[in-house]
Image (spheres, helix red, strand yellow):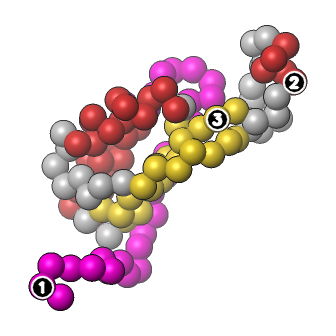
Amino acid sequence: MKEIKAIIRPVRLDDVREALMRTPGFPGMTVTHVEGCSAPGRHQPQNLKEELLDFSPKVRIEMVAADEHADTLYEALKQAATTGHVGDGLVWMSEVARCDYLWQPGG
């Protein structure tokens, strides 16, 4: 199993959701609204309002996927979230040692 996480622009969430829903093996996802800031020197403020605000709204996506679907889901998320501009966010994937559903039909 793999855990796939991403921090993306909120405006990209609908596109990411639609792309993942079309991707085989999509297990569902958890979405959290968060705030973030860029590393020093990586982002130039575009206006005074942006310069005065330390944090900008972002969306964190989390899912745990079967190994055979993880790479495809990762790429679908990455492609749908990307605008090509600074501040798009990041996506990462890591191993999951164990994962169990807390509720299972008939169980």
| Residue span colored magenta | 80-107
> Can residue 91 be seen?
yes
Residue drawn 42% across and 34% down?
13
Disc number lying in front (3 or 1):
1
Residue occupying the point 42% across, 55% down:
30
Q: Position of residue 39 (x, y in %)?
A: 77, 38
Q: How far apart are marks 3 and 2 (CA)?
A: 14 Å
Distance of label 1 from label 2 (alpha carbons): 54 Å
Q: Residue furthest left?
A: 106
Q: Report the quarter where the C terminus lies.
A: bottom left
Residue 66 appears at what percent x and percent y?
A: 25, 65
Indicate yes or no whether the magenta region holds residue 95: yes
Circle 2 sits on which residue?
52
Q: Name the residue under label 3.
A: 57
Left or right of residue 51, residue 17 in this image: left
Distance (Cα) linking label 3 and label 1 = 41 Å
Residue depicted at x 26% and y 58%? 27
Q: Is mark 3 on a helix, strand or loop?
A: strand
**Secondary structure mostly taken by the magenta-highlighted segment of the chain:** loop
Q: Can you tell which quarter of the image residue 3 is in?
A: bottom left
Q: In this view, does 64 lie above or below 78?
A: below
Label 1: which residue? 106
